[in-house]
């Protein structure tokens, strides 16, 4: 169960969060969101008051390096390297409607855990976490179990997530990839960073009708702006070869290669960037 998540208002939102502001510092050992981690409902204003705000700093947790537990020289537990936690000013995952939300806090994702080798088995270092001013993933394919807080792979969500009128004024920093101290280990890649959303889509490979099929859910971003500094994560460092892996992508609006749907409204012009 994922009880190591942190959100300023709640962990899972299925209703309406209206005109709410978080001013507290949010720290997690995994994913962290200024308002919530999973949004299936609405985070909006009432048309009278200004935006829903996050003013607190949000720090996601570092991934733990891999290790084993032995008893009488026999391995009894494997603990795999963990990816760095994702951090967002409003919600890490959005499957609903986020309207007129603003982040003013500093958002930091976690670093990836270092890999290890045991009994000729290689567990590579993990990637750094992703960070965004509004949300990391603007699409969710599966529902979340309210007891375990993990995705339920049997429930498909046919929703159209949208970010509308959102802005980010905070500095955004993705996590670094995990290092390597062995020639046989691959280092982790740096995480992605974005002022608004890292991934405006989500693709899952599912097994249906005796074959694997890709299900892609597109998100929508409307009239977004960013004024914060956006920094992608560095790759991990190989201590034996002095070589690095891949750094993360960074963008003012989106860091992903495939954006989904993004457009402007009226005469207002915004600059959309990709990593």
Image (cartoon, helix red, strand yellow):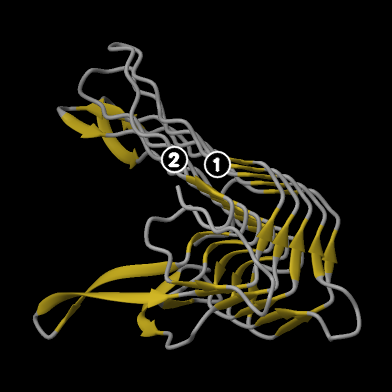
Q: Judge by depth and name the residue closer to the eye, 199 or 157.
A: 199
Judged left or right of residue 114, residue 231 is right
Residue at image location 57% in from the left, 53% down from the top: 31
Q: Position of residue 258 (x, y in %)?
A: 37, 62
Judged left or right of residue 193, residue 266 is right
> Which residue is tagged 2?
248
Judged left or right of residue 184, residue 165 is right
- In the rendered image, the vertical position of residue 231 relative to residue 258, given as above or below: above
Q: Where is residue 185 in the image (x, y as percent from the top left)?
A: 25, 26
Figure quadrant of residue 240: top left
Figure quadrant of residue 118: top left
Among numbered discs 2 and 1, the one appearing first in the sequence: 1
Name of the residue lying farthest toward the front: 267
Residue at image location 49% in from the left, 76% down from the top: 145
Residue at image location 74% in from the left, 69% down from the top: 101
Q: Position of residue 165 (x, y in %)?
A: 70, 73
Q: Judge by depth and name the residue closer to the eye, 15 or 246.
A: 246
- In the rendered image, the vertical position of residue 33 relative to residue 45, given as above or below: above
- In the rendered image, the vertical position of residue 74 relative to residue 142, given as above or below: above
Q: Judge by depth and name the residue closer to the eye, 111 or 138.
A: 138
Residue at image location 38% in from the left, 84% down from the top: 156
Cα separation between marks 2 and 1: 8 Å
> Which residue is tagged 1?
174
Could you classify mark 1 by the number of other residues whose Cα lies within 10 Å: few (under 14), some (14-19), or many (20 or more)?
many
Residue contact between numbered discs 2 and 1, judged by CB atoms under 8 Å: yes
Q: Residue 271 carries which label?
A: none
């Amino acid at each position: 169960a994922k009880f190591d998540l942190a959100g300023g208002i709640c962990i899972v939102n299925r209703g309406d969060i209206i005109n709410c502001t978080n001013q507290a510092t949010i720290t997690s050992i995994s994913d962290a969101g200024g308002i919530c981690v999973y949004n299936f409902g609405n985070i909006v204003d009432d048309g009278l008051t200004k935006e829903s705000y996050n003013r607190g700093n949000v720090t996601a947790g570092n991934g733990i390096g891999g290790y084993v537990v032995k008893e009488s020289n026999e391995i009894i537990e494997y603990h795999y390297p963990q990816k760095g936690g994702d951090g967002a000013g409003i919600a890490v995952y959005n499957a609903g409607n986020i309207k007129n939300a603003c982040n003013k806090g500093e958002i930091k994702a976690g670093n990836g855990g270092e890999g290890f080798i045991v009994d000729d088995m290689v567990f590579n270092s993990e990637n750094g976490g992703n960070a965004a001013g509004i949300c990391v993933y603007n699409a969710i394919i599966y529902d979340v179990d309210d007891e375990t807080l993990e995705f339920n792979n049997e429930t498909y969500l046919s929703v159209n997530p949208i970010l509308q009128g959102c802005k980010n004024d905070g500095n955004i920093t993705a996590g670094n990839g995990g290092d390597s101290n062995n020639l046989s280990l691959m280092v982790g890649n740096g995480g992605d960073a974005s002022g608004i959303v890292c991934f405006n889509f989500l693709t899952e490979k599912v097994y249906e009708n005796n074959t694997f099929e890709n299900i892609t859910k597109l998100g929508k971003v409307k009239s977004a702006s960013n004024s914060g500094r956006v920094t992608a994560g560095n790759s991990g460092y190989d201590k034996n070869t002095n070589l690095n892996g891949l750094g993360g992508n960074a963008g003012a609006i989106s860091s992903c290669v495939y954006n989904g749907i993004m457009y402007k409204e009226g005469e207002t012009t915004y600059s959309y960037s990709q990593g």
